[in-house]
Amino acid sequence: MSRPDDRPLKRLPQLEARKSELERCVFCPKLCRTACPVSNAEPRETLTPWGKMSMAYFVANESVALAPSFADPAWACTGCFGCREHCDHKNDVAGTLFDARSALVESGTAPASAKRVIERFSEKSAVLGKSAAELSVMPEVDESAPTALLLGCAYARSAPEESRDAVRATAQLVGGKVSLVKVCCGAPLLHAGDKKGFLQQGEMLAQAIKHKELLVVIDAGCASTLRVHHASNGVDMTVPVEHFAECAARELGRMKRVPGLGDGPVRYHDACQLGRGLGVYEQPRALLSLALGRAPEEFDRRRADARCSGAGGLLPVTMPDVSKTIAKARVDEHEANGGGTVVTACASSLRTFRKQGAKAVDLVTVVARALGVGSKGDG
Ligand code: SF4
Ligand code: SF4
């Protein structure tokens, strides 16, 4: 029997497929409310997972106006999956809000900052091709190699040393050369609200690697975009897709302890997309333990309960102050737990931690040094 107030999502019919996820939240006593980094940083009811899902639902079924005050909360999400861990239904809030963003963009109501990301996507994502051209002089790079390596736009743009470490380390791990992927996974389009463009980007990437045997992905965000978001929308990469940590952890026997690395505390930050996104918790810890000669230090909030760095889901663009508050909370937690070096496997987290003044090192740099091919010291 349908409920008396059960109404079709007439204004945003694209969200009919997400109606059950939306209704789970709308009729929920908000069990996950303490899990959301956004509403913890800016305590407003509309920014809780419940609030964001409810606003999208009520816009869709015409209970409220199609206005920025009701639409914009859909962009107040880092896509961290934190709420899902606290939800008895394991409700897919992040994926539903990304779909809501797309439906709202199509309806003409979206934050100007998100629209700009869509408009400038081609120009911005060209950084991958530019970086690939620069790195192509490295002896480890060969277009015809069977292993494809996707650095990700954020590494290509802001982490040149880590990009070189990634090339050298991956070539060592696969025992050959690597071919650099020049096509973006489309995550900025997913996060901004251009789902059609996002899916087209996935198809283009699948085409670009269809003759390869393996795709190794450096950025946790790109890996999760391919294996979670593209896969759930039916876009198949056709070749195995591995995050760098998964690939490296199979070759632990070839690595050595890194002198000096473990002289002070070295704490591992579970990037949301690698941990909650892909369930990869053990491999980075095994790699770090080997490089340090002991287990790494841990945050109080770790693994599935790890706090977000605030750098995902386009939050630094749509809500920069909230993003900074979230990043500061994670760095403060690092300091309160003893400080030292923080290691992660996500270019956005790496950048945001460094901006907050933390000493942050990427896992690729640690592994490259453990393999004897690292480009520099400890960052
Ligand atoms: S994600 Fe789960 S716990 Fe959170 S509001 Fe939605 S249904 Fe409730
Ligand atoms: S995915 Fe993360 S940021 Fe988004 S609503 Fe859930 S807890 Fe909040």
Image: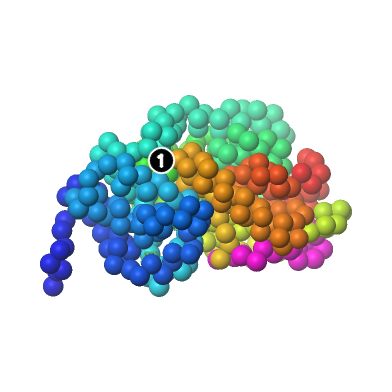
Among the 4 quarters of the image, the one containing residue 202: top left
In the image, residue 201 lies at what x, y percent? Answer: 41, 39
From where the camera sits, is residue 350 visible?
Answer: no
Of the 4 image quadrants, the one containing the N terminus is bottom left
Q: Which residues are magenta?
A: 287-304
Is ligand 2 less than 8 Å from the beta carbon at label 1?
no
Location of residue 351 with respect to 9 vertically, above or below: above
Residue 280 located left or right of residue 285: left
Q: Is residue 301 magenta?
A: yes
Location of residue 193 with respect to 49 vertically, above or below: above
Residue behind mark 1: 192
In the image, residue 345 lies at what x, y percent? Answer: 63, 51
Camera-side residue of 275 and 269: 269
Residue 62 located left or right of residue 370: left
In the image, residue 17 lies at what x, y percent? Answer: 26, 56
Q: Amino acid at mark 1?
A: Ala
Total labels: the figure holds 1
Camera-side residue of 5 and 135: 5
Quadrant observed for ligand 2 in the rendered image: bottom left
Identify which residue is drawn at 68% across, 35% down: 160
Identify which residue is drawn at 59% across, 41% down: 151
Identify which residue is drawn at 42% across, 48% down: 76
Under circle 1, the secondary element is helix
Among the 4 quarters of the image, the one containing residue 121: top left
Identify which residue is drawn at 55% across, 30% down: 127
Q: Is residue 324 magenta?
A: no
Of the 4 image quadrants, the one containing the C terminus is top right
Location of residue 102 with respect to 231 vertically, above or below: above
From where the camera sits, is residue 133 visible?
Answer: yes
Callout 1: few (<14), some (14-19), or many (20+) C-alpha neighbours within 10 Å?
many
